[in-house]
Image (cartoon, rainbow, N blue to C red):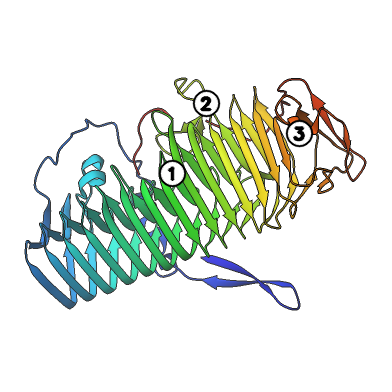
Amino acid sequence: MLTRSLLSFPALALASIVIEDPSNVISPSLWASDNAIVPDYDIAMVSSQPSAIKATHTVDGESSSANHVTWSATANDTSVLLVANDATFTGSYITFNKSGYSTNLDDASFWGFNAAVNVANASTAEFRHVNVTVHNGAAQFYSYGTDTVVHVNDAWLYSSGPVSHGLYASGNGTIIGRNVQVYSGGKRSSSFSGDSPAGYIYVYDSVAHAAGIGSATFYALGEIHAQNVVSLSENGPVVFSDGAQTTNLLDCDCKAGLLGGVAMFSSSERESGAKLNLTNTKFTTTGSLMPGLWFGNVIAEATLHNSQLVTKSGVLVVANYSQITQDFDYYAGYADNNNLKPAEVTVTVTESDLTGDLVAYNGSSINWCLGKHSSWTGYAYSGYGDASFDVTLDSTSTWTLTGDTTVQNLTDSRSSLTNIHSQGYTLYYNASVSTWLDGKTVSLPGGGSAEPISSSSSKRASSVRGSVRRSWRA
């Protein structure tokens, strides 16, 4: 069961609204054995579709429709409905029941074998008022191929078993969901997911609950665009993002229980161009070691506008030389993969008030930019090894230090630094980089000071653990 917190005015009392999802109707305990299945990706990769996709109902190269029907499939590797080859389908008030295993999870990931509904190869489909129940491990709605577009409206989606994504797009396919309620109980079963080479997901006014390990609300391999989504990922982050992907979230309230609010990484060579944009959005992380935003082996940009990162750990951002394990259950260390590169992250914050720390490891860097009436309470430090931090403040923004901090490039629109409240701590800056300060020691409000250092310096501290082995899929 999900809750969404509201700040009630003018009493300023914190209230909660209970939001139901499909797990309130079908108890996950009824399918505990399904949800305990561990996905097996130790299988031979193939570069082309190995065989024809099977389905109990097929629309091939034609237009068709259905309403007020119940369709089922029970065999392994068999969809309930296949719409393919420039076909068109419209359906309303349809119940889809799917059971039967995916015997090859690569086939399920890349071509939608065993998905309840598979729309492929430049086909279009629109569904309204649909109920999909999936067991044993199967995607619910799958879109494959350039010019394939699937609309899912007013949908109730329940799944058990591994790799049971709710809305799932691959091969440059697109899915647009509105008023979707989705629950997945299995491992690696993200609510809204893209896969190689790219999937395009648009979600509006929806509720998502993912319970299994490695199951996120959003898995970005392509693009994610979401508005007004309330979600809980019990054992995963809000967002997984692998490589140069884009995630845009507007008016969302999401909670994560494993890894971080966001886990952005490159699963092989370090890629640049990863983007995360949060607007009017709140992320809550519940674990004592979970940061709000985590980045590994990637060059990324994040923007936060009028948004919140609420972390039990007290850490806002982590940048590391690391990836995610194949099971998406922990950050693998140097011993797991020593052929990575440090993360390089730029975070731009506007109209937001944030409390927490910045932590970088193993040569990683964080460029932290505060603007448009933002405030930050926290400090920056190295979790292990060398680290680099740049901090920029405009004249409307403030920084309250909670510990001694070393930065390379300090940029402040207030040359007097009166918007940096020291609380007695010292802010060290690299005089050879922040040349505008002329190597001066500047007194800060609160009794501390900004002091020059002659070369880069980093402070070591014990903090959040960070660091995958090969190319992963959703």
Q: Few, some or many C-alpha atoms within 10 Å of disc 2 (few <14, some 14-19, many ≥20)?
A: some
Q: Quadrant of residue 428?
A: top right
- Marks 1 & 3, CB-CB < 8 Å contact: no
Q: Is residue 49 left or right of residue 130?
A: left
Q: Nearer the viewer, residue 473 or 225?
A: 225
Q: Residue at x 81, y 29 (%)?
A: 438
Circle 3 sits in a helix, a strand or a loop, which is it? Answer: helix
x then y, percent, for residue 172 = 26, 50
Compared to residue 378, the image places residue 389 above or below, namely above
**Amino acid type, callout 1:** Ser
State whether residue 26 appears in this view.
Answer: no
Circle 2 sits in a helix, a strand or a loop, which is it? Answer: loop
Upstream in sequence: badge 1 or badge 3: 1
Q: Real-space Cα distance between discs 1 and 3? A: 37 Å
- Marks 1 & 2, CB-CB < 8 Å contact: no
Tell me the quarter of the image containing the C terminus. top left
1 vs 2, front mark: 1
x then y, percent, for residue 153 = 32, 72
Upstream in sequence: badge 3 or badge 2: 2
Circle 1 sits in a helix, a strand or a loop, which is it? Answer: strand
**Amino acid type, callout 2:** Gly
3 vs 2, front mark: 3
1 vs 3, front mark: 3
Q: Quadrant of residue 96?
A: bottom left
Which residue position holds label 1? 241
**Amino acid type, callout 3:** Trp
x then y, percent, for residue 31 = 36, 56
| Circle number at residue 436 | 3
Which residue position holds label 2? 333
State whether residue 443 appears in this view.
Answer: yes
